[in-house]
């Protein structure tokens, strides 16, 4: 799909993105916008090299792509100066390689904070009140009249929950003791970036420190949790609950996870509101445009 074919700057988006604001912004600034329409969900390095071709000024890419040496050298050879991930996370981007090839990198912080918090809160409450299990109970025709069944794991009154999350969250900032947080928290919601220091942050040992009836939420990156250890923990602790938006081998789940009744799994939708995704697309376009036009890159993760 090509917009403004005679534009001076060639900008590629490796996937179609929501809304048209981002396209219009680029067109207004003399860009030819090319959107990859391949049906494949995840593009390989080779697919992207073919897209970049001989001349390309900037690329908007996705978190499913491996932006390392090979792609940044290809982009640089094509005269490219800018790359933006359409995501706040950039664990798929080798920023050092980009710098080596003179390509500026952008990401999309800010616009997805509330939307992500909303999903984390929804998963926590759904886990606490066993919403998915209750729904399955109904659909299986097991509801045969009002009974005093217990469909709670944790009793968190909504007010307390909002207070804990909105006003005084217990946030582990690495200076305080993670051990204390693990032992005391009823709900632990993970939101770190993924790097060497957060890989398998939640593992067999940390899980064993958590309350037997705790709720663990992960809306960050899958590998922050050792998913094999988690499946074992869920099996051994039926009252432990987990709400996962991300997976270690995304888009796949580790064996056994899908069978666990005490897990709620959703397909990486924490930022999936129309407003947020359009905001991310716009920010990604502005990052690339800023660099091409010589304005400061809006959201450079290096800063
Ligand atoms: C991000 O932006 O990093 C989220 O994981 C996807 O919206």
Image (cartoon, rainbow, N blue to C red):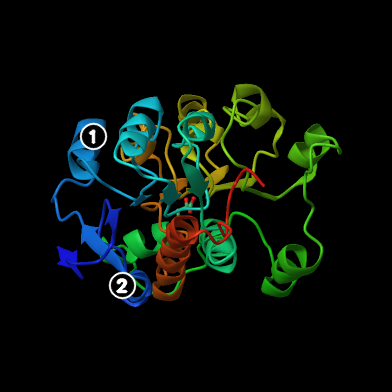
> Element type at marker 2?
helix
Left or right for 60, reference 42? right
Which mark, residue 8?
none
Residue hosting label 2: 27
Whether residue 177 sits left or right of residue 13 in the image: it is right
Residue 191 locus on image (x, y percent):
61, 48
Q: Nearer the viewer, residue 219 or 142?
A: 219
Q: Is residue 170 above or below residue 46?
A: below
Q: Is label 2 in contact with label 1 (beta carbons under 8 Å)?
A: no
**Residue 40 in view here:** yes
Comparing labels 2 and 1, the label whose residue is closer to the camera: 2
Q: Quadrant of the N terminus?
A: bottom left
Q: Secondary structure at mark 1?
A: loop
Q: Between disc 2 and disc 1, whose residue precedes?
A: 2
| Quadrant hosting residue 70 | top left
Percent from the top left, x then y, of residue 87?
46, 53
**Residue denoted by label 1:** 44
Residue 40 screen position, x and y as percent:
16, 45
Q: Tell me if 179 is positioned left or right of 258 in this view.
A: right
Q: Residue at x 45, y 25 (%)?
A: 228
Q: Quadrant of residue 2?
A: bottom left
Residue at the image position 25 percent from the left and 63 percent from the top: 33
Horizontal side, residue 131 vs residue 171: left or right: left
């Amino acid at each position: 799909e090509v917009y403004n074919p005679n534009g001076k700057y060639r900008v590629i988006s490796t996937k179609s993105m929501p809304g048209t604001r981002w396209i219009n912004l680029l067109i207004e600034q003399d860009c030819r916008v090319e959107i990859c329409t391949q049906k494949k969900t995840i593009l390989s390095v080779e697919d992207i090299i073919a897209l970049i071709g001989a001349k390309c000024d900037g690329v908007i890419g996705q978190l499913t792509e491996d932006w390392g040496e090979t792609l940044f050298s290809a982009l640089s050879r094509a005269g490219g100066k800018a790359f933006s991930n359409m995501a706040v996370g950039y664990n798929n981007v080798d920023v050092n390689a980009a710098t080596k090839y003179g390509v500026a990198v952008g990401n999309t912080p800010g616009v997805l904070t509330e939307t992500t918090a909303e999903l984390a809160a929804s998963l926590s409450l759904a886990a606490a009140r066993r919403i998915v299990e209750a729904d399955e109970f109904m659909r299986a025709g097991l509801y045969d009249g009002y009974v005093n069944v217990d469909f709670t794991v944790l009793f968190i009154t909504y007010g307390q929950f909002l207070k804990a999350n909105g006003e005084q969250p217990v946030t582990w900032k690495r200076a305080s003791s993670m051990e204390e947080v693990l032992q005391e928290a009823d709900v632990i919601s993970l939101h770190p970036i993924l790097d060497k220091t957060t890989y398998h942050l939640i593992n067999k040992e940390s899980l064993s420190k958590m309350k037997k009836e705790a709720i663990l939420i992960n809306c960050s990156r899958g590998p922050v949790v050792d998913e094999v250890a988690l499946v074992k923990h869920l099996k051994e602790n039926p009252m432990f609950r987990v709400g996962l938006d991300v997976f270690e081998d995304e888009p796949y789940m580790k064996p056994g996870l899908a069978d666990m009744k005490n897990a709620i799994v959703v397909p990486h939708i924490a930022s999936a509101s129309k407003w947020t995704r359009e905001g991310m697309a716009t920010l990604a376009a502005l990052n690339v445009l800023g660099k091409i036009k010589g304005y400061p890159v809006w959201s450079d993760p290096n800063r």
